[in-house]
Amino acid sequence: MKNTLSRVAFAGILALASCASGPTPEEIAAKEQARVDSIAAVEQFRADSIATVAAEQARLDSIAAVEQFRADSIAAAAAAPAKKGK
């Protein structure tokens, strides 16, 4: 019984010592690389979002220009017969 208790206590001490040693340099480097990759992904998403908004604004500006041109053409066409009649 005493021998078994000694072995269990020794195994517990080994388990505690292996957990308390902290992360290895490789684990630290992997964690840092994951953090850097995450920041890069967020920055890329932000840049993509800004580009999408800019493209949508350009599309809306183009539609507005076409609508303005259309309205100006209609107004010019409506004014043209009035000038001929005078």
Image (cartoon, rainbow, N blue to C red):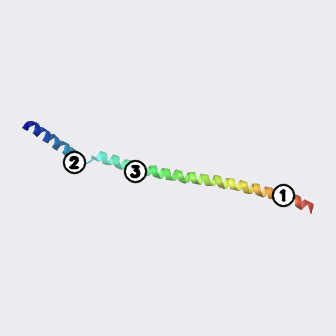
Left/right of residue 69 with respect to residue 2 in the rendered view: right
The single residue placed furthest to the bottom in the displayed view is 86
The dot on residue 36 is 3
Question: Looking at the figure, which quarter contains the N terminus?
Answer: top left
Task: Looking at this view, name the residue that lies furthest to the front.
Answer: 1
Classed neighbour count for the residue bearing mark 2: other residues with Cα under 10 Å, few (<14), some (14–19), many (≥20): few
* Residue 28 relative to residue 61: left or right: left
Locate the C terminus by quadrant.
Answer: bottom right
> Which secondary structure, mark 1?
helix
Q: Which residue is mark 1?
A: 78
Labels 2 & 1 near each other (Cβ < 8 A): no
Please give the name of the residue rendered at 62% of the width and 55% of the height, measured from the top-left corner: 57
Alpha-carbon span between mark 2 and mark 1: 87 Å
Q: Indicate which label's residue lies in the foreground, 3 or 2.
A: 2
Q: Amino acid at mark 2?
A: Ala
Q: Nearer the viewer, residue 29 or 31?
A: 31
Q: Residue furthest right?
A: 86
Where is residue 10 shown, x and y percent of the image? Answer: 13, 41
Looking at the picture, which amino acid does disc 3 mark? Val
Query: Callout 1: few (<14), some (14-19), or many (20+) C-alpha neighbours within 10 Å?
Result: few
First-in-chain label (3 vs 2): 2
**Which one is earlier in the sequence, the residue at label 2 or at label 1?**
2
Look at the numbered disc 2 and give the secondary structure of its residue.
helix
Q: Residue at x 83, y 56 (%)?
A: 77
Q: Residue at x 50, y 53 (%)?
A: 46
- Alpha carbon of mark 3 to alpha carbon of mark 2: how far? 26 Å
Q: CA distance from mark 3 to mark 1?
A: 63 Å
Task: State the image coordinates of residue 12 (x, y, percent, origin top left).
Answer: 17, 42
Q: Position of residue 43 (x, y in %)?
A: 47, 52
Q: Nearer the viewer, mark 3 or mark 1?
A: 1
